Image: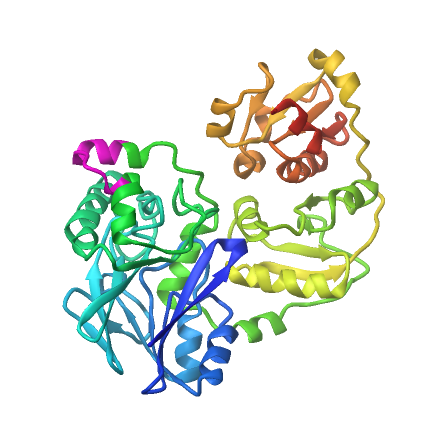
Amino acid sequence: MEIEQFEDKSLSHYSYAILSECFKEMVVIDPARDIKPYLAFAEKHDATIIGVIETHPHADFVSGHLELHQTTGATIYCAALVGAVYLHQAFDDGDVINLGKTTLKALNTPGHSPDSVSVVLEHDGKDKAVFTGDTLFIGDCGRPDLREKAGNLTAMREELAAKMYHSLRDKLMMLNNDVIVYPTHGAGTLCGKALSEANSSTIGAEKLSNWSLQSITEAEFITKLLQDQPFVPKYFPFDVEINKHGAGNLAQAIANIPVGRVTKLNSSIYIIDTRAEKEFKKGHLPLSINLQNGDKFETWLGSIVAPEEAFYLVAENEEILASLILRCGKIGYEHFIERAFVFQAGTEVMDAFDIDWFLMKKTDYTIVDIRNNGEVKEHPIFENAINIPLPELRERLSEIPFNKPIVIHCAGGYRSAAGSSILQSVFAEQTKVYDFGVAIKTLLK
């Protein structure tokens, strides 16, 4: 028996292949949208993929479970409460999947969602590992506030937090201390708030170090779990629904995207310009948002652009453009790309920011802090700044006065590049807009 962990760093996502080497059979858990790595692993080991397990309908990425089924004939397993539209087999308490000498056992572990399951791997009669989905992370547990308005079965965050308390204690903590914990997410995900950088642990180690497994009352647990959860990107409920139905073939969807520059663009559609901020400021097209090609591109795209909103996608060369189209597909946004094209320059520019002059004349500017509320609370910078987190900026433009030049800042420059470009597209005719950029780091030391 072999366990292979696959990692998508941009989404902090772990998926798994469990291989029975003697029987040449394989089961995949929580696959990413792009199924090629699982097919390649199966081919390398001359194995047949017989099953795909969804621990829950994911909010932060589109799963490849349906395409794996359509490609290989593998059975899809999920909790009955998912209400899955695709062909599947219910996988709940007491249900098992036999994989050679290995048995995969279902544990209903609601908390992150009402329909979450964990998967216990038993080999040679002993529990060896547990795949905890978004229930138990390394150092944390899943947030309970993503299913109040999404999915087949909705639930209030307080109700799910209580269920999480009991799932952890009545199900997962009952496993032996040496059972290895394999979560679906690591540090950087928005499905939790305090995850470790580690990609696996043991039940025993988590009992010692994970705050959510400590000896506290249910009320204390609920209060702590609900505190300071990160923002919820616009695309999360959308992806829950996609995963409930199952996503179509990724390659076919990408092939349908119009690629190449045209002479006339729709002036009401935003352009997602992924070039480096220095190049963007030198010249870009009107109505452009500078969402740079970075580690969390997918998350920020799905936080700024709402599902069903069309956008143009721009990159500096064909290779990068192709990779970014694929990254849009990871969150189900490939269908919203009006057109994708390569672009190097434009008529719109953004003036350079003079930090020394600004620091002498701060009251002459409107300062907009687009960090998240928790960041502002922990590290305030400018006393009179207007705090509007980047995911809310387009919806709260009316709160920003334009009787002075506007300066946008975040904590490192990535978000302010996007935020300043949004404000420039709206206020360019009323006032100057400046990006504080990476210089803000000098004030955060």
Residue 265, quarter of picture: bottom right
In this view of the protein, can residue 268 be seen by the observer? yes
Whether residue 141 sits left or right of residue 319 in the image: it is left
Colour mode of the rendering: rainbow
Task: Say which residue appears at 20% left-offset and 43% top-offset.
Answer: 165
Q: Position of residue 251 (x, y in %)?
A: 57, 74
Task: Please report the residue visible at 54 percent of the width from the left and 20 percent of the height from the top.
Answer: 380
Q: Which segment is the magenta one? A: 212-223
Total number of numbered discs in the rendering? 0
Residue 133 image position (x, y, % from top left) = 33, 58
Q: Main secondary structure of the magenta part?
A: helix
- Can residue 156 be seen from the camera position used here? no
222 is within the stretch colored magenta: yes
Instruction: State the image quarter where residue 224 is shown.
Output: top left
Rendering coords of residue 402 (x, y %): 69, 22
Residue at the (40%, 51%) spot, across then down: 237
Front residue of this view, candidates 45 and 388: 45
Image quadrant holding the N terminus, namely bottom left
Relative to 225, residue 70 above or below: below
> Which image quadrant for residue 325?
bottom right
| Above or below, comparing residue 26 to residue 276 in the picture | below
Taking 166 as reference, is 305 left or right? right
Q: Position of residue 119 (x, y in %)?
A: 26, 64
Location of the C terminus by quadrant is top right
Q: Nearer the viewer, residue 286 or 80?
A: 80
As for residue 335 lying within the magenta part, the answer is: no
Q: Residue at x 62, y 60 (%)?
A: 337
